[in-house]
Image (cartoon, rainbow, N blue to C red):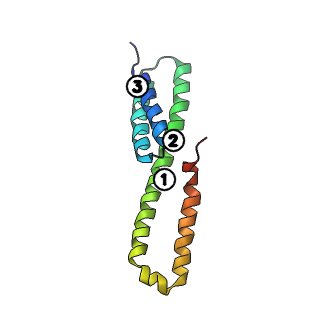
């Protein structure tokens, strides 16, 4: 029996990588998940142990990237929510310069922490 799931998963993961490189992180994460589901199913039916080992290594890398994107998107959502809250309470922040510094520090820290997403090798 031919394992058609592997070529399908490879095609999907190629699209995920392309979306990832284009900074389309939500789309990339969705595609990685779809590809991982197919790879996982393909591993169930794979008889060749060396091919199975290679697939597991690839799946682990894709899974790690999907997890990184998930964390990044969650942090971005939290950041955007915090920015919304801070703009609603801008008069409070004007009265307290320390809050401005803390907010700016959080923004800079967040940008530094997630800047790797914009750099592709």
Residue at position x 51%, y 17% in the image? 48
Tell me the crowding category of disc 1: few under 14, some 14 to 19, or many 20 or more residues within 10 angstroms, Cα based: some
Q: Residue furthest top?
A: 1
Query: Badge 3, how many Cα within 10 Å: few under 14, some, many 20+?
Result: some
Q: Which secondary structure, mark 2?
A: helix
Neighbor class of circle 2 (other Cα within 10 Å; few <14, some 14-19, many 20+) is some
Location of mark 1 (residue): 72
Q: Residue lying farthest front?
A: 22
Q: Is residue 92 positioned above or below 38 on the image?
A: below
Q: Position of residue 4 (x, y in %)?
A: 39, 19
Furthest toward the right, the residue is 121
Q: Nearer the viewer, residue 34 or 111?
A: 111
* Image marks 3 and 1: residues in contact by CB distance under 8 Å: no
In the rendered image, residue 117, in percent from the top left (x then y), is placed at 54, 49
- Residue drawn at x 45%, y 25% as measured from the top left: 43
Instruction: For the residues labelled 1 and 2, say whether their Cβ atoms are less than 8 Å apart.
Output: no
x and y, in percent, of residue 119 in the image? 59, 47
Q: CA distance from mark 3 to mark 2?
A: 20 Å
Which type of secondary structure does the marked residue at label 1 adopt? helix
| Quarter of the C terminus within the rendering | top right
Residue at 48% x, 53% y is 72
Give the residue at mark 2: 21
Placement of the N terminus among the 4 image quadrants: top left
What residue is disc 3 on? 8
Q: Earlier in the sequence, mark 3 or mark 1?
A: 3
Q: Name the image quarter holding residue 88.
A: bottom left
- Closer to the chain start, of discs 1 and 2, is 2
Q: Is residue 36 above or below residue 88?
A: above
Disc 3 element: helix
């Amino acid at each position: 029996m031919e394992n058609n799931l592997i070529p399908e998963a490879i095609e999907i993961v190629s699209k995920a990588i392309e979306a990832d490189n284009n900074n389309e992180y939500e789309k990339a994460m969705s595609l990685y998940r779809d590809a991982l589901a197919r790879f996982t199913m393909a591993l169930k039916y794979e008889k060749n142990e060396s091919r199975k080992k290679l697939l597991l290594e690839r799946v682990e890398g894709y899974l790690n990237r999907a997890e990184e994107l998930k964390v990044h998107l969650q942090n971005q959502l939290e950041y955007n929510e915090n920015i919304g809250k801070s703009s609603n309470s801008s008069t409070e922040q004007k009265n307290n310069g320390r809050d401005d510094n803390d907010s700016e520090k959080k923004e800079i820290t967040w940008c530094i922490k997630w800047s790797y997403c914009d750099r592709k090798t």
